[in-house]
Image (cartoon, grey):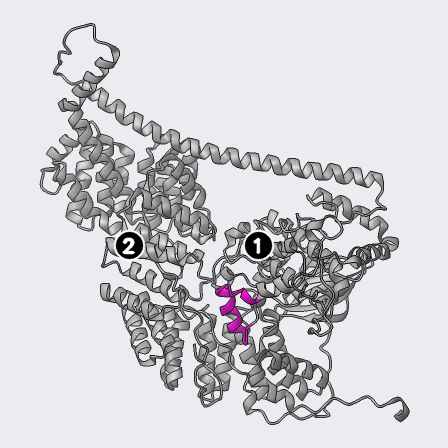
Amino acid sequence: MADAPSSDSDRTVPQPGPLDQRAETLAFRPPPGAGSEEAPTCPAAPEPPAPALPAVPGYVVTREIGRGGMGVVYAARDPQFERELAIKVMHPGQSADQFVVEAKVTAGLPHPGVPPVYALGALPDGRPFLAMKLVEGRTLAQELNGAGRADLPRLLDHFQRVCLTVGFAHARGVVHRDLKPSNVMVGAYGEVQVMDWGLATRPAHERPTVSDEPTEPARGRTAATSGGRVRGTPAYMSPEQARGEPADDRSDVFALGGILAAVLTGAPPFAGDTVADTVRRAARADLAECFARLGACGADADLVAVARRCLAPHPADRYATGARPWRRPWPGTGPAWTTGASAPSATGPRPRPGRPRRRTPGAKRRPWAGAERAHAAEQRKRRGAQCAAAVTALVLVGALGGFAWWRDKQRTSASERADARAGAERLRIEADGAAVAARLAGERDAEARHKADQARAGVRSGLALATDLHPVQVQTGGGGAGAGGGAGRGAAHRSCSPGSSRARADLAFVERLDDIRFRKWAWVAERGGRGTFNTKRAPAEYRRAFADHGLDLAGLAPPEAARRIAAAAVRAELVTAVDDWALHEPDVALRDRLLGVARAADPGPWSDRLRDPGLWGDRAALAKLAADTDPARTAATGLSALAELMRRNNLDPAPLLSAARTKHPGDFELAFALGQWRVADRSGRQIGPYEAARALRPDNPTVWRNLGVALGWRGDLDGEIAACRELVRLVPNDATAHNNLGAALSDKGDLPGALAAGQEAVRLDPEYAAAHDTIGLTRARMNDLAGAIASFREAVRADPQFARGHNNLGVALKAKGDLVGAIAAYREAVRADPDYAVAHSNLGVALHIQGDLDGAIAAFRTAVRLNPKYALAHTTLGMALEGKNDSAGAAAAYKEAIRADPRYALAHSNLGALYLRQQRYPEAIDCARAALKDDPEYPEALATLGLALLKTGDVPNARAALTRAAKLNPKQYGPLLAQLPSPPVAPAPHEK
């Protein structure tokens, strides 16, 4: 997509990223305004004084170590225990939530590879601080710089320990989400620690986030995957993270593969001309260059195969956890990981330092003879000072399930036995775990089959009972018939008896009512993680079903209708359906008529109390009824109805339903009702109840539909796809089922399969707007922009009020270069849904490009009013205000973006560029560093940092920052670097 034209302030409007289910999620990075800066000079201004050290209660701060996006790290002394440690203090004005989450996650990982947390406290000004282990050393990224062939065993040893640490975190349910060499610290004594757990998540307390880009398709359907922001480091980011999808253990495994690739080849998996380009490459899983480098690095094929498997584009093809890549032999332990290379050609190109030379065709591969010797020498060098620590670490690693990667020939026999015992115990625990998982899976499947068999047996018993009780006795004729013949005649007789016919009709009627009652609870997802139930369809369907069965409840006199229902063999099921119909009937007169029929057909004190419409809107009365209800003595259908009324009045029915489930664990209605109440819970609490309901009623389509929603939101795409396939099997002619499957397959990356499923949905229902939209999104991912535009046009033709379809059409037209058409589509989107924040923001971007700054500002202000946590809209508002020379308003907008998302690099960088133009150099430096904390390869932030450092007289660091910026974007920042004064040349010895 082409860059937008510059505005009067020489700033570029953020551009949309790849067209996907988060339309216009990614933004091109704006230049820091360097073009308006005067030619850089070398002022003699003194370096600004260092900021004062904070007073941290209980500790003596000695020096500053470094600064990041969330806070500052200081070295300090603990007088009580007389030890050196690190103190991390949060920046002023930031939310403490993420800081505290990082502290708790880190503290919950007691592993040698995670820096231990000593304390969490607060400064006098209220800012939190974290006391943790001080690790003096270098990052793995620094270790990789200039590394040579002989360093490979040591680097693989570091990588091995990272795998162990990440595997331990995965076993505790923690996903790091930002693994990279710069987040791995190698201590002075050889310890390897995984740092910066600020983006980590765990199921128990995953941080709540607001979806910035809620164009997640409702798919007209019931499922939606996470529409969150892109978080992480693009160069090492998994494709699913780059697309804004939830990250799990396999996302960390991809990053581990990236680290291994960097160890073997000297380069990360993805590298683009800009950060946005790098993110796009990651989203497309553009790994061709990376795999080519791996193939040419000269390492053993098995070692390269492990890296390639970690870097598989689809998560299902990767190792399951971070510990899995480590479970391969390492250098010195077997041939699988032995590396080899041929002698370099005298005329060939000189290999890059740190990369093994590529073997020439036909050359004989041989092991690197010095690798094991270098590894052994490294171990001997450490052994004298660390003998006791090494033995302790050995026992710890063995207890955690690792093979003894500290093993060498000097280990004592006692430690060898301890390690062997630990290894055996690990294998036993793993085997037990696998057996338990298999047994539970088998029990669930067996339970589902048992329940289905029970249902079928119940139908057969009911039909036989109807025949036995029929008053007309039929002569079976003559004795002496064999058992087989008697059974055949009995079956023939049952098929012809009036009782059998009535039972079959009742059974079909009850199944139809059951389908109506549960199908209305199919969750219809909407943008931004919101959604609703499709309950409006139920009243008309109930009316047709009862009329088809000869019970026209709208026309029959209520006493007669009640008499017929009370006399029916399926009275309880009919009364349940009538009560449910009344609960959703919009016609008050018909609703009261239905309630009267239900009272007369099945009276009861508790039921009749619930049938009082005056109670339905009385929150206090409903709460009292729930408190007075005994779950053990109340029908599940009544509890489900009460739960629905509580939901309408913002009361939580979960305690009531949970208590009822403890009394009746095998009741499908209760399990389904509990899952239904929590259907939109992104934490996944609804999955358990839905799984239980699925086991009890595996033939219920709504359970599979809603279970797919829950699994998709939790990032379990394989589970979502499995649920969608089962849904399609149960209801093959349901267009929404095929659309659900198509959307899930598209999220997974199976674009041909997604397209086929979407087309089947459209074949079944040509006017299904959401299915056309899903096809359009899939075609866009397949780079078929013309086909995507055609599908989006079909979506809005089928449903002119389909706001998401109009928005996505605008994105596609803008990508094609039709700015006028895009603006018209965005206006249609906000007309169809005035509360659609993303469409307002996208309209603002398009108007800004067109030069209508006033219109753009109005659109951006509407977007942030509708969604105050919309960081991108705050940032684009700031850029538009800069175009109007409103620097104060722009700075306020950037600060609001940072408040909404403290790790939003674009906002930090833009604010820093603004401070740079205002000659507020210390603030500019802080903002640029904050942007680089989240995105170390951000060229605009590097340029801002370099220019600000230059203005403060720090020429060496300014040159370093501008050199990195020019390397990332030579066209824009190369000339800027060329204007710097040349570094002084050291005098020759005879000139000193």
Residue that mark 1 sits on: 309
Image quarter of residue 92: bottom right
Q: Residue drawn at (50%, 74%), measured in percent from left and top?
A: 896
Cα separation, mark 1 vs mark 2, equals 34 Å
**Which callout, 1 or 2, points to the residue nearer the camera?**
1
Q: Main secondary structure of the magenta part?
A: helix
Residue closer to the observer: 659 or 422: 422
Check residue 373 for magenta coloring.
no
Hey, what amino acid is under mark 1? Arg
Residue 8, quarter of picture: bottom left
Identify residue for label 2.
761
Look at the image and say whether residue 282 sits in the magenta stretch.
Answer: yes
* Residue placed most toward the observer, 69 or 244: 244
Q: Which residues make up the magenta segment?
A: 272-289
> Residue 350, how many percent across, how many down?
71, 73
Q: Which amino acid type corresponds to the residue marked 2 in the rendered image?
A: Ala
